[in-house]
């Protein structure tokens, strides 16, 4: 099968979406498919698009102004002239690149699947709502309405789309976790020293690893971390650090750094910036717990990755990870300081045995429910269905 993926941003700073598409491509090539990625680069403040190794066919085009539209006449022309694939898989919303992919599919009479990536969640639609309302009217809602199938990462996201009136079939397929790759990385880090280890100087630490954006709630975590430190009158947690990994808006990063200074915890916050896959795995494996105090999440790749490394997780009710507590591998709280502080204190108080038990439970859950192999099988079944017809796969909702 010839598969064409279209994603408007494919830079390392794009976080989970870049990683998940890379996983799709690697797995689909291994299954014998012909795979192409169509993407843009040149966004202000971001790195060039990631280049995947052959045999993945990379089609990378320069971004045209204005950057916020994600437009590229060169991409539009090339998509119209390319040998038609069997199926298009579009990833994301709001950028003109998505309309180019949908238009090419219509003109070439090929099906397309659209991965919505949480961009129609209530919280997401409220951000810059006036601009998004215009874009929805201009082209974006049509891209959803005319998709052969919408791809979402959780039942929660599927319900959001139905409430908004979109009637296309919906495939509920989570983001897959490559457990084999994680185990390989964990084997490597046991035998090597990381530069991050030198920075941490053997301090126990809590980890925040994500794109540094208001949506992800880092400012909330800093306030909660300050509250934890303030409550530590005996000094029992004086050695603990909050390790912050990732990049994002310079303005937001500056705001969070200033907040840590104002709250008197700047020395207890370690800013690591961008981390590569090896460093990321080291941090997940060595962290006492992982915290994602997000305002909105359609899936939360980093939650699954942390659990796969055997690390307990604290996250919020605004994610599809409500079963963390049921599986006894983490905490799910409201996104307030008052709710996050006690969860942090409970996590810091875990003894080694309790932490190991929580970590093992999380690994078991991810291995059984979120393996990359099962996700790739579901995605492929959707491709065959939209291309050839027949009965829909079990992961597809028609109602």
Image (tube, grey):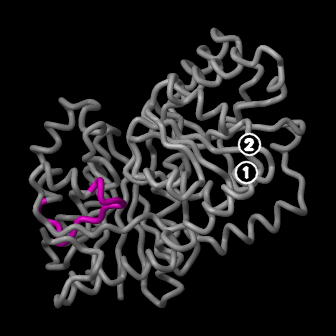
Is 30 drawn above or below residue 63 in the view shown? below
Q: Is residue 109 left or right of residue 123?
A: left
Give whichever of discs 1 and 2 has the lower sequence position. Answer: 2
| Residue 282 lies within the magenta run | no
Q: Which numbered dot is residue 350? A: 2
Q: Is residue 83 visible?
A: no
Q: Which numbered dot is residue 315? A: none
Mark 1: few/some/many CA within 10 Å (<14, 14-19, 20+): many
Residue 324, image x and y in percent?
51, 53
Q: Residue at x 53, y 76 (%)?
A: 26
Q: Residue at x 59, y 23 (%)?
A: 224
Q: Is residue 310 left or right of residue 148?
A: right
Q: Which residue is mark 1?
A: 355
Residue 187, image x and y in percent?
81, 68
Mark 2: few/some/many CA within 10 Å (<14, 14-19, 20+): some
Q: Is residue 190 left or right of residue 339?
A: right
Q: Residue at x 58, y 54 (%)?
A: 328
Q: Quadrant of the C terminus?
A: bottom left
In which image quadrant can residue 73 be found? bottom left
Q: Is residue 124 left or right of residue 375?
A: left
Determine the secondary structure under disc 1: helix
Give the tally of numbered discs: 2
Q: Are marks 1 and 2 in contact (CB under 8 Å)?
A: yes
Residue range (magenta): 145-157
| Residue 146 lies within the magenta run | yes
Is 214 drawn above or below residue 138 in the view shown? above
Q: Quadrant of the N terminus?
A: bottom left
């Amino acid at each position: 099968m010839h598969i064409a993926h279209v994603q408007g941003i494919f830079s390392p700073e794009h976080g989970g979406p870049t990683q998940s598409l890379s996983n799709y491509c690697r797995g689909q090539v291994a299954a014998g498919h012909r795979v192409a990625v169509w993407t843009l680069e040149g966004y202000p403040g971001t790195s060039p698009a990631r280049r995947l190794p052959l045999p993945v066919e990379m089609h990378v085009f320069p971004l045209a102004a204005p950057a916020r539209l994600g437009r590229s006449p060169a991409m539009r022309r090339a998509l119209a002239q390319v040998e038609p694939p069997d199926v298009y898989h579009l990833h994301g919303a709001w950028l003109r690149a998505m309309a180019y992919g949908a238009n090419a599919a219509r003109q070439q009479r090929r099906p397309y699947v659209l991965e919505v990536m949480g961009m129609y969640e209530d919280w997401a639609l409220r951000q810059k709502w006036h601009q998004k309302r215009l874009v929805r009217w201009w082209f974006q809602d049509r891209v959803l309405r005319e998709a052969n199938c919408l791809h979402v990462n959780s039942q929660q996201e599927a319900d959001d789309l139905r409430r908004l009136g979109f009637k296309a079939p919906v495939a509920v397929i989570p983001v897959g976790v490559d457990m084999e790759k994680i185990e390989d990385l964990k084997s490597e880090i046991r035998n090597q020293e990381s530069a991050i280890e030198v920075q941490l100087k053997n301090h126990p630490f809590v980890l925040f690893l994500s794109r540094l954006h208001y949506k992800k709630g880092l400012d909330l975590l800093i306030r909660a971390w300050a509250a934890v430190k303030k409550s530590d009158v005996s000094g029992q947690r004086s050695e603990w650090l909050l390790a912050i990994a990732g990049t994002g808006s310079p303005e937001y990063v500056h705001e969070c750094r200033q907040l840590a200074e104002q709250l008197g915890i700047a020395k207890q916050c370690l800013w690591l910036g961008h981390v590569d896959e090896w460093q990321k795995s080291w941090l997940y494996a060595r962290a006492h717990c992982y915290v994602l105090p997000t305002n909105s999440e359609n899936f939360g790749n980093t939650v699954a990755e942390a659990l796969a490394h055997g690390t307990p997780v604290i996250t919020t009710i605004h994610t599809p990870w409500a079963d963390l507590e049921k599986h006894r591998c983490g905490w799910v709280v409201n996104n307030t300081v008052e709710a996050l502080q006690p969860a942090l204190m409970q996590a810091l108080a875990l003894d080694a045995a309790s932490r190991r038990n929580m970590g093992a439970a999380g690994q078991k859950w991810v291995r059984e429910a979120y393996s990359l192999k099962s996700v790739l099988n579901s995605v492929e079944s959707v491709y065959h269905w939209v291309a050839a017809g027949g009965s829909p796969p079990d992961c597809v909702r028609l109602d």
